[in-house]
Structures are given as structure tokens and as C-alpha cells.
Amino acid sequence: MIRDIPEKTLEELSRLISTHTGLYFPEQKWTALNKGVQSVINDLDTDIHQFIRCLQVSPPKEIIDSLTARLTIGETYFLRDKNFFQILQDHILRGIIEHPKRKTKKIIFWSAGCASGEEPYSIAILIDHMFPVLKNWDITIIGSDINPVALEKARKGFFSSWSMRETPEKIIKKYFTPAAGNYFQIAPHIRQMVQFSQLNLMDGYYPAALNCYEPMDIILCRNVLMYFNEHGRNSVIQKLSGLLIDNGWMITGPAESGFVNLPEFTSVRFPNALYHRKGPPRKEFETPRPIRVSREIINTRPAASVPAERRKLDQRYGRRQTDGKAPPSPEKPKYDMYQEALRDYNLRDYSQSVKKLLVILSKEQNGSNAFLMKTESMVLLAKAYANIGELEQARTWCEKAIGTEKLNPEIYYLLSTIFQSAGDIEAAVKSLKQSIYLDPEFIMAHFTLGMLLRQKQMPGESKKSMQNALSILELKDADETLPFSEGMAAGRLIETIKSMKIN
């Protein structure tokens, strides 16, 4: 049973835990701190007073490991933020390939705070996908985390369907094997591409723990810096900067980009993203043309009659020549068109968004170089159609998106809203149940299901759904914004449900 720890004690715990691990728990996060510490005390079969006394001296490694396992969120999934992986493929890696800073063809990635390994394995999958371009390159991928339990899971390479929820079906079929208990085992050759190390970012020296003494090209520290206070963040960022090669990249989470303000970094803005490159601003445009990974293009040889200088340009940009004639104007990359469609959607110009998305998804434009954005394009198209009242088209594209990512609960939730708009409550309820099956902690799905069941005059089932939502909500911080709630905070939704007098 979880009992409330007195506030004064929580304040002392917050200070001690920050000292030993760097993890920062301000007052608004004391609910999570209370829950995590109580779990550790139960694990150790001790009491709060003995636990604090232990932290006041020099706690053994097993206690620190237990704390970090309980207090860090190891929840992640494959290809998290596909926008980043598309930028990594099309722009960042192209820059490294065309303007190398090493004498040898080598790229070193480090995923700092990798949890159970989905992020470094996603990088390995992308590298494998880009094999024709990176065929002769030496690739090192390191994943590190403070949580030993999460690292053990990463090394084993078994993942639940929840870790695959935004992974395209083609990638699942190519790189994973179904295992018992609704699990998937990652392909051996992908698992062998990643090495894992336990590392507390508050430690003084990283290379020894990582077994890597060369400068790194790309460091990913996404959704990690938010755990530290200002002093801890600045210390970590400074040390990460020292490990980067000139023109190396620091990748943070969207909410963390403002933390990186060292003079040695240049902030580089991409569509819907801001990353940091070590070095002064470049005179030329920061983002080169997207890289092409089609095997057919890579293996095509230009005709002998084409002048040498033109051949170099054709080889660089993936254009094909067969008869010496001037090439057609290069098509706009799908990724750029998607960003334009997204901009139109955000400006509520839904018809223009639809036109561009249909071009992206047409067979003529459906190349392999933007494979990560296919589902996102379908989902955005479904939303755009719904906003102009074309509900049948919206449903069609939403169902196509489900066909590409069958384990993604968010797309089923979108489909339920389309059914609701069309007045098909039965179908909406069915989609919500599928969404909850894939994500039992999907708060807005539980709440919306409760509302629909209430509308269907099913008070008993409605009450159960509302209670499910309430039980998950009560573990959240009151001011935490809920996904798919149009900005509603957890505390506000708790008040809303309780005002309905479901008990």
C-alpha cells in the first residue's frame, strides 16, 4: 500500500536523490517521488527513516540502482518521433557523408538515456535501411542508461507490442520475429550493431563507462535533461559537448532545446525541429538536399556521353541520364511536401493540405527515401478530410493508416472520432475499445468511451470506464497536460469526472 510521505521528508528525499543521481524532483513532482520511494522501501524491506539515513551517507550501488529503476520513466518505443529519423536520414547523415571530419569512413552514435534500447535499435534499423549509401562505413552505436533493469531488457532484445506501436508493419516484418506472450524479438544482426553500458550522467568521466575514447558524431539526449536541475543540466551539456567531433550534432527533446546555449553550438532549425551542431554557423544553407537511398539509383551509371562535371552533379543528387538530354526538374522531396501540407493544415487550409498529401501518397511519388512519413501522411490526410466534412474519405485514409501501423492506439482513437462525427456510435465504441486494448492507460480513450456509453444509456459500463480513467489520472501530476485532450490538465479532468457523480 502506498502511504503519503510527509512533505518535509519528501523535500529532504528530493535533495538527497538529486545529490546521488542528478534526478530532480521539484514539489509538483512529489506525487511521483512518493510513489517511487515507497516502492523502493518495499523492495528493500526497510522503513523511510532507515532509508533516509542510508542516503545521508554513501548508499551502496544496489540502492541507487533500485531508486533509478523506480524513479525514471523507461517508457519509449521504436522510431519515436519519425520526423527526427527522417531528418537524420535526409540531412544530418548526408552532411556527414559529404563533408566528413575523419580520415576514415566512420560514424559514432551515442543514445544517452536509452532506457530499454528502442532508440539505439531504431538507429541501427535506419542504418541498415541506408546500407547502399553506408556500405563501406564503420558504424558504432552506443546506448547508455542509469537504469540497470532497462538495460538488461535492451540487451535481451525482446519487446512488447507497446514498444512497436508506431512502427510500420513493413519494418516489423523485416526486423522482428514474433515471440511468445505478444512479444517481438529484434533481428540478431540489428542487436549486434548496438553496445550498451550503464552510466549515470552525473558521473565525472564518460568514455571509460562507454568504452569509447573517440569523438562522437551524433549524441542523442532526448527527454533526459528534463530530469535534472539547472546546475545538473549545464554540467551534462558541457560534458556532452566535449565528446562531440567538430560539426557533430546534439539532439535533444523538443522541450529541451532551449537548455543548450553553449557558445560552441549553432542552433539549426529544421521543419518542426531544432537541433544543435558543434561549430560556427555555415555560410551555405544548413540543410542539404535529402539523401536518396534507392538501390536502383545508387547502382545506376551515367551515360558516357554526359560531360564529367554534369556526371558529378547527377551522381550527387541521384539524377539519371540515359541520352545526354537535360534532366527534368528535380521533384520536390516528399518530406518537404509533407511539411508544406502540415503547414497548410495548421493554417486551416485543409483543401490545400489534402492536395499535397494526395500527391505524396500517389504511386508515382511513393519512393523509399521518405518511408518513415507514410503513415503520418495518411493520418494527416484523414484529419484534413474530416475537417472539410469528407468523413468517408477520412475514414478510408484512417483505415489505410491502421493497415501500416496496426499496433498504434492513437490511430484507432482518431478513427473513433471520425465515426462519432458520422453518428456511428457503435463503430466509435469498437474503435475506442481497440485503442484501449493496445494502450490500457490511454486516459482520453477511457473517458471518451465512458461518455459514449453514457450516451447509449449504459450507466454500469460507463461508470467502469470513468473509474478506469480516474484511477490512471490520480497517478498524474495535477498540472500535467493530457494527450488528445485539447490542452486539458489532469486535475481538470479529475474534477470533470467527479462532478458527473459516477460513484
Image (cartoon, rainbow, N blue to C red):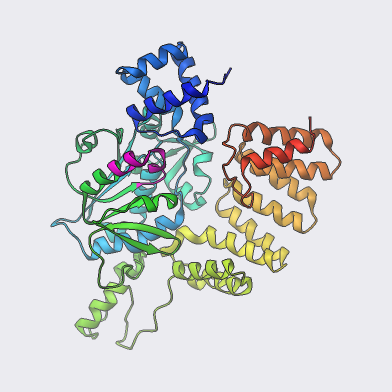
Residue range corresponding to the magenta coloring: 221-235
Q: Quadrant of the C terminus?
A: top right
In the image, 387 versus 497, the foreground residue is 497
Q: Position of residue 319 (x, y in %)?
A: 33, 76
Residue 230: image x %, image y %? 36, 42
User: Which picture quadrant has residue 442?
Assistant: top right
- For this orientation, the residue located farthest to the bottom is 325
Residue 456 is covered by the magenta coloring = no
* 326 left or right of 39 in image: left
What type of secondary structure mainly makes up the magenta span?
Answer: helix
Q: Quadrant of the N terminus?
A: top right
* Residue located 35% across and 57% down the image: 275
Q: Taking the image as drawn, is residue 269 in sight? A: yes
Furthest-front residue in view? Answer: 8
> x, y percentage for residue 244?
22, 50
Q: In this rendering, would 450 be left or right of 276?
A: right
Residue drawn 21% across and 46% down?
243
Asked if residue 434 shows in the view, the reply is no
